[in-house]
Amino acid sequence: MDQYRVTSAAGFSLAQFSPGDTSAFEGSRDEAKKHLKNLRKELAELQFLLWAEDKHKLLVVLQAMDTGGKDGTIRNVFKGVNPQGVWVTNFKAPTAEELAHDYLWRVHPHAPGNGEIVVFNRSHYEDVLVVRVLDLVPSQRWGRRYDHIVDFEQRLVDEGTTIVKIYLNISKDEQAGRLQARLDDPERNWKFNAGDLDHRKLWDEYMAAYEDAIARTATATAPWYVVPANAKWHRNIVVTQILVDTLKALDMKFPEPEAGLDTIVIE
Ligand code: ATP
Ligand code: MG
Protein backbone atom coordinates (compact mmCIF):
# COMPACT_ATOMS: atom_id res chain seq x y z
CA MET A 1 0.00 0.00 0.00
CA ASP A 2 3.10 2.19 0.14
CA GLN A 3 2.43 3.51 -3.35
CA TYR A 4 -0.72 5.24 -2.09
CA ARG A 5 0.70 6.63 1.17
CA VAL A 6 1.63 10.31 1.51
CA THR A 7 3.59 11.35 4.59
CA SER A 8 4.89 14.78 3.60
CA ALA A 9 4.54 17.51 1.02
CA ALA A 10 7.88 16.60 -0.55
CA GLY A 11 7.35 15.78 -4.20
CA PHE A 12 3.61 15.32 -3.78
CA SER A 13 1.06 16.18 -6.42
CA LEU A 14 -2.34 14.66 -7.04
CA ALA A 15 -1.50 14.25 -10.72
CA GLN A 16 0.84 11.38 -9.76
CA PHE A 17 -2.14 9.32 -8.66
CA SER A 18 -4.36 7.74 -11.26
CA PRO A 19 -8.02 7.36 -10.22
CA GLY A 20 -8.36 4.38 -12.56
CA ASP A 21 -5.36 2.45 -11.24
CA THR A 22 -6.09 -1.20 -10.39
CA SER A 23 -2.54 -2.41 -9.96
CA ALA A 24 -2.80 -3.52 -6.33
CA PHE A 25 -4.65 -6.68 -7.33
CA GLU A 26 -3.93 -8.55 -10.50
CA GLY A 27 -6.19 -11.61 -10.42
CA SER A 28 -9.61 -12.19 -11.95
CA ARG A 29 -12.78 -10.61 -10.62
CA ASP A 30 -13.69 -13.86 -8.89
CA GLU A 31 -10.32 -13.97 -7.23
CA ALA A 32 -10.73 -10.33 -6.21
CA LYS A 33 -14.00 -11.18 -4.49
CA LYS A 34 -12.39 -14.00 -2.57
CA HIS A 35 -9.44 -11.81 -1.69
CA LEU A 36 -11.70 -9.08 -0.30
CA LYS A 37 -13.59 -11.67 1.72
CA ASN A 38 -10.35 -12.91 3.26
CA LEU A 39 -9.16 -9.39 3.98
CA ARG A 40 -12.45 -8.57 5.65
CA LYS A 41 -12.11 -11.62 7.84
CA GLU A 42 -8.66 -10.47 8.83
CA LEU A 43 -10.01 -6.99 9.59
CA ALA A 44 -12.77 -8.47 11.73
CA GLU A 45 -10.24 -10.52 13.71
CA LEU A 46 -7.99 -7.52 14.23
CA GLN A 47 -10.93 -5.40 15.34
CA PHE A 48 -11.89 -8.08 17.84
CA LEU A 49 -8.35 -7.94 19.20
CA LEU A 50 -8.40 -4.13 19.29
CA TRP A 51 -11.61 -4.25 21.30
CA ALA A 52 -10.31 -6.97 23.61
CA GLU A 53 -6.98 -5.30 24.27
CA ASP A 54 -8.75 -1.99 24.93
CA LYS A 55 -5.55 -0.02 24.54
CA HIS A 56 -5.34 1.48 21.05
CA LYS A 57 -7.80 3.73 19.24
CA LEU A 58 -8.16 3.97 15.46
CA LEU A 59 -9.46 7.00 13.60
CA VAL A 60 -10.21 6.60 9.90
CA VAL A 61 -10.86 9.85 8.07
CA LEU A 62 -12.72 9.38 4.78
CA GLN A 63 -12.84 12.22 2.30
CA ALA A 64 -14.06 12.28 -1.30
CA MET A 65 -15.89 14.36 -3.84
CA ASP A 66 -19.65 13.76 -4.17
CA THR A 67 -20.29 10.22 -5.48
CA GLY A 68 -16.71 9.40 -4.50
CA GLY A 69 -17.86 6.26 -2.72
CA LYS A 70 -17.60 7.06 0.98
CA ASP A 71 -20.82 5.26 1.82
CA GLY A 72 -20.05 2.26 -0.36
CA THR A 73 -16.59 1.97 1.13
CA ILE A 74 -17.92 1.97 4.66
CA ARG A 75 -20.57 -0.60 3.75
CA ASN A 76 -18.16 -2.93 2.00
CA VAL A 77 -15.07 -2.65 4.16
CA PHE A 78 -16.74 -2.92 7.57
CA LYS A 79 -19.18 -5.66 6.67
CA GLY A 80 -18.47 -8.38 9.20
CA VAL A 81 -16.87 -6.35 11.97
CA ASN A 82 -18.51 -6.31 15.36
CA PRO A 83 -20.75 -3.23 15.30
CA GLN A 84 -19.99 -2.80 18.96
CA GLY A 85 -16.70 -1.00 18.73
CA VAL A 86 -17.01 0.60 15.31
CA TRP A 87 -18.70 3.98 14.93
CA VAL A 88 -19.32 6.11 11.88
CA THR A 89 -19.69 9.86 12.31
CA ASN A 90 -21.05 11.93 9.42
CA PHE A 91 -20.01 15.53 9.20
CA LYS A 92 -22.64 17.45 7.26
CA ALA A 93 -22.95 21.19 6.82
CA PRO A 94 -22.53 22.65 10.33
CA THR A 95 -25.56 23.60 12.42
CA ALA A 96 -25.99 27.11 13.80
CA GLU A 97 -24.64 25.93 17.14
CA GLU A 98 -21.61 24.33 15.51
CA LEU A 99 -20.96 27.47 13.48
CA ALA A 100 -21.02 29.50 16.66
CA HIS A 101 -17.94 27.58 17.83
CA ASP A 102 -14.50 26.96 16.38
CA TYR A 103 -14.51 24.35 13.61
CA LEU A 104 -12.85 21.62 15.69
CA TRP A 105 -15.42 21.91 18.46
CA ARG A 106 -17.81 19.47 16.83
CA VAL A 107 -15.08 17.04 15.88
CA HIS A 108 -13.17 16.21 19.03
CA PRO A 109 -16.06 14.56 20.96
CA HIS A 110 -16.27 11.92 18.24
CA ALA A 111 -12.61 10.87 18.41
CA PRO A 112 -12.27 7.17 19.26
CA GLY A 113 -11.75 5.84 22.76
CA ASN A 114 -9.71 2.79 23.74
CA GLY A 115 -10.59 -0.28 21.72
CA GLU A 116 -12.69 1.70 19.26
CA ILE A 117 -12.60 2.35 15.55
CA VAL A 118 -14.25 5.57 14.45
CA VAL A 119 -14.79 6.41 10.80
CA PHE A 120 -15.25 10.06 9.93
CA ASN A 121 -17.50 10.26 6.86
CA ARG A 122 -16.28 13.73 5.87
CA SER A 123 -14.40 15.47 8.65
CA HIS A 124 -12.60 18.58 9.86
CA TYR A 125 -11.01 18.63 6.39
CA GLU A 126 -14.23 20.12 5.04
CA ASP A 127 -13.08 23.26 6.83
CA VAL A 128 -10.19 23.63 4.38
CA LEU A 129 -12.03 22.12 1.39
CA VAL A 130 -15.63 23.26 0.86
CA VAL A 131 -15.02 26.24 3.13
CA ARG A 132 -12.07 27.33 0.98
CA VAL A 133 -13.70 26.62 -2.38
CA LEU A 134 -16.96 28.38 -1.51
CA ASP A 135 -15.18 31.15 0.34
CA LEU A 136 -17.20 30.54 3.50
CA VAL A 137 -14.64 32.23 5.74
CA PRO A 138 -11.83 34.66 4.83
CA SER A 139 -8.67 33.07 3.47
CA GLN A 140 -6.57 34.33 6.40
CA ARG A 141 -8.78 32.20 8.60
CA TRP A 142 -8.87 28.93 6.66
CA GLY A 143 -5.21 29.41 5.76
CA ARG A 144 -4.23 28.92 9.38
CA ARG A 145 -6.25 25.76 9.75
CA TYR A 146 -3.75 23.41 8.14
CA ASP A 147 -1.40 23.96 11.06
CA HIS A 148 -4.21 23.62 13.60
CA ILE A 149 -5.23 20.34 12.00
CA VAL A 150 -1.69 18.96 12.12
CA ASP A 151 -1.48 19.93 15.80
CA PHE A 152 -4.92 18.53 16.61
CA GLU A 153 -4.13 15.21 14.98
CA GLN A 154 -0.69 15.05 16.58
CA ARG A 155 -2.33 15.54 19.95
CA LEU A 156 -4.62 12.59 19.30
CA VAL A 157 -1.65 10.51 18.16
CA ASP A 158 0.41 11.47 21.21
CA GLU A 159 -2.44 10.28 23.41
CA GLY A 160 -2.65 6.87 21.77
CA THR A 161 -4.74 7.28 18.62
CA THR A 162 -3.69 5.82 15.30
CA ILE A 163 -4.85 7.96 12.39
CA VAL A 164 -5.38 6.91 8.80
CA LYS A 165 -6.67 9.48 6.32
CA ILE A 166 -8.12 8.26 3.06
CA TYR A 167 -8.93 10.30 -0.01
CA LEU A 168 -11.07 8.32 -2.45
CA ASN A 169 -9.69 9.56 -5.73
CA ILE A 170 -12.28 9.48 -8.54
CA SER A 171 -11.97 11.23 -11.88
CA LYS A 172 -14.33 13.91 -13.10
CA ASP A 173 -15.57 11.54 -15.83
CA GLU A 174 -16.28 8.84 -13.29
CA GLN A 175 -18.33 11.34 -11.29
CA ALA A 176 -20.34 12.18 -14.41
CA GLY A 177 -21.20 8.51 -14.84
CA ARG A 178 -22.19 8.09 -11.21
CA LEU A 179 -24.37 11.19 -11.19
CA GLN A 180 -26.05 9.97 -14.38
CA ALA A 181 -26.67 6.58 -12.78
CA ARG A 182 -28.42 8.32 -9.88
CA LEU A 183 -30.69 10.02 -12.41
CA ASP A 184 -31.36 6.89 -14.43
CA ASP A 185 -32.03 4.39 -11.68
CA PRO A 186 -35.29 5.04 -9.77
CA GLU A 187 -33.87 3.29 -6.72
CA ARG A 188 -30.98 5.71 -6.71
CA ASN A 189 -32.92 8.88 -7.49
CA TRP A 190 -33.02 9.65 -3.78
CA LYS A 191 -29.24 9.98 -3.81
CA PHE A 192 -29.31 12.62 -6.52
CA ASN A 193 -28.73 16.07 -5.12
CA ALA A 194 -28.92 18.92 -7.63
CA GLY A 195 -26.57 20.88 -5.38
CA ASP A 196 -23.81 18.37 -6.24
CA LEU A 197 -23.76 19.89 -9.74
CA ASP A 198 -22.70 23.25 -8.29
CA HIS A 199 -19.75 21.58 -6.59
CA ARG A 200 -18.96 19.71 -9.81
CA LYS A 201 -18.58 23.03 -11.63
CA LEU A 202 -15.82 23.85 -9.15
CA TRP A 203 -13.99 20.55 -9.72
CA ASP A 204 -10.61 22.15 -10.43
CA GLU A 205 -10.85 24.37 -7.36
CA TYR A 206 -11.69 21.31 -5.27
CA MET A 207 -8.72 19.40 -6.68
CA ALA A 208 -6.43 22.31 -5.80
CA ALA A 209 -7.92 22.41 -2.30
CA TYR A 210 -7.47 18.64 -1.86
CA GLU A 211 -3.92 18.83 -3.11
CA ASP A 212 -3.03 21.53 -0.58
CA ALA A 213 -4.91 19.85 2.24
CA ILE A 214 -3.11 16.56 1.68
CA ALA A 215 0.30 18.16 1.16
CA ARG A 216 0.03 20.35 4.24
CA THR A 217 -1.34 17.76 6.66
CA ALA A 218 0.35 14.52 5.58
CA THR A 219 2.73 13.39 8.32
CA ALA A 220 4.44 10.13 9.18
CA THR A 221 2.10 9.72 12.16
CA ALA A 222 -1.11 10.81 10.41
CA PRO A 223 -0.54 9.78 6.79
CA TRP A 224 -2.87 10.32 3.87
CA TYR A 225 -3.63 7.54 1.42
CA VAL A 226 -4.69 8.61 -2.06
CA VAL A 227 -6.76 5.58 -3.03
CA PRO A 228 -7.71 5.05 -6.67
CA ALA A 229 -11.48 4.86 -6.51
CA ASN A 230 -12.91 4.63 -10.02
CA ALA A 231 -13.02 0.83 -9.74
CA LYS A 232 -15.08 0.05 -6.66
CA TRP A 233 -13.88 -3.56 -6.30
CA HIS A 234 -10.26 -2.41 -6.25
CA ARG A 235 -10.99 0.51 -3.92
CA ASN A 236 -12.55 -1.88 -1.40
CA ILE A 237 -9.51 -4.14 -1.48
CA VAL A 238 -7.08 -1.24 -1.07
CA VAL A 239 -8.94 0.40 1.82
CA THR A 240 -9.39 -2.90 3.66
CA GLN A 241 -5.73 -3.75 3.14
CA ILE A 242 -4.65 -0.35 4.49
CA LEU A 243 -6.69 -0.90 7.65
CA VAL A 244 -5.43 -4.46 8.07
CA ASP A 245 -1.80 -3.32 7.68
CA THR A 246 -2.34 -0.43 10.10
CA LEU A 247 -3.91 -2.61 12.79
CA LYS A 248 -1.30 -5.34 12.36
CA ALA A 249 1.46 -2.81 12.95
CA LEU A 250 0.02 -2.12 16.41
CA ASP A 251 1.28 -5.52 17.49
CA MET A 252 -1.76 -6.12 19.70
CA LYS A 253 -2.16 -8.92 22.20
CA PHE A 254 -5.13 -10.36 24.05
CA PRO A 255 -5.05 -9.26 27.70
CA GLU A 256 -3.33 -11.63 30.10
CA PRO A 257 -5.91 -13.96 31.62
CA GLU A 258 -6.38 -14.06 35.36
CA ALA A 259 -3.94 -16.39 37.10
CA GLY A 260 -5.02 -19.92 37.87
CA LEU A 261 -7.70 -20.33 35.19
CA ASP A 262 -6.46 -23.87 34.52
CA THR A 263 -7.37 -24.97 38.01
CA ILE A 264 -10.93 -23.63 37.93
CA VAL A 265 -13.72 -26.19 37.77
CA ILE A 266 -17.17 -24.88 36.86
CA GLU A 267 -19.82 -26.82 38.72
P1 ATP B 1 -24.12 11.55 0.30
O1 ATP B 1 -23.23 10.52 -0.31
O2 ATP B 1 -25.27 10.95 1.01
O3 ATP B 1 -24.47 12.66 -0.64
P2 ATP B 1 -22.60 13.56 1.70
O4 ATP B 1 -21.45 13.38 2.63
O5 ATP B 1 -22.31 14.22 0.39
O6 ATP B 1 -23.22 12.15 1.49
P3 ATP B 1 -24.62 15.51 2.01
O7 ATP B 1 -25.63 15.72 3.05
O8 ATP B 1 -24.99 15.34 0.59
O9 ATP B 1 -23.72 14.30 2.49
O10 ATP B 1 -23.59 16.69 2.03
C1 ATP B 1 -23.01 17.20 3.15
C2 ATP B 1 -22.48 18.54 2.74
O11 ATP B 1 -22.04 19.20 3.91
C3 ATP B 1 -21.33 18.46 1.77
O12 ATP B 1 -21.57 19.26 0.65
C4 ATP B 1 -20.18 19.00 2.58
O13 ATP B 1 -19.24 19.69 1.80
C5 ATP B 1 -20.90 19.90 3.55
N1 ATP B 1 -20.10 20.18 4.73
C6 ATP B 1 -19.51 19.30 5.56
N2 ATP B 1 -18.78 19.94 6.49
C7 ATP B 1 -18.90 21.25 6.24
C8 ATP B 1 -18.38 22.42 6.84
N3 ATP B 1 -17.58 22.35 7.88
N4 ATP B 1 -18.72 23.60 6.31
C9 ATP B 1 -19.53 23.69 5.25
N5 ATP B 1 -20.05 22.62 4.63
C10 ATP B 1 -19.74 21.41 5.11
MG1 MG C 1 -23.85 14.55 -1.08
Image (cartoon, rainbow, N blue to C red):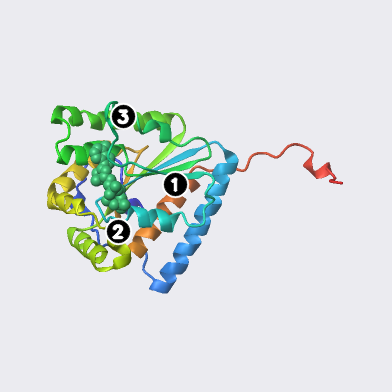
**Label 2 sits on residue:** 190
For the residue marked with disc 3, what is the amino acid? Glu
At 47% across and 33% down in the image, what residue appears?
A: 160
Q: Which mark is residue 170?
A: none
214 horizontally vs 47: left or right: left
Q: Nearer the viewer, residue 149 or 107?
A: 107
Distance between the alpha carbons at the discs numbered 3 and 1 = 35 Å
Kindly indicate the quadrant of the structure image that contains residue 150. Answer: top left
Residue 108 lies in what quarter of the image?
Answer: top left
Q: Residues within 10 Å of mark 3 (few under 14, many from 20)?
A: few
Question: Badge 1 is on which residue?
Answer: 246
Q: Is residue 150 above or below residue 177?
A: above
Mark pair 2, 3: CA separation: 28 Å
- Secondary structure under the numbered disc 1 in the rendered image: helix
* Secondary structure beneath label 2: helix
In the rendered image, is residue 11 in sight?
no
49 and 139: which is toward the camera: 139
As drawn, is 93 to the left or to the right of 222? left
Residue 220: which quarter of the image? top left
The amino acid pointed to by label 1 is: Thr
Residue found at x 83% / y 42%? 264
Give the CA separation, mark 1 to mark 2: 35 Å
**Between discs 2 and 3, the one toward the N terminus:** 3
Q: Can residue 190 be seen by looking at this rendering?
A: yes
Q: Residue at x 53, y 39 (%)?
A: 115
Q: Position of residue 104 (x, y in %)?
A: 32, 30
Coordinates of residue 87 in the picture (x, y in percent) = 46, 44
Q: Earlier in the sequence, mark 3 or mark 1?
A: 3
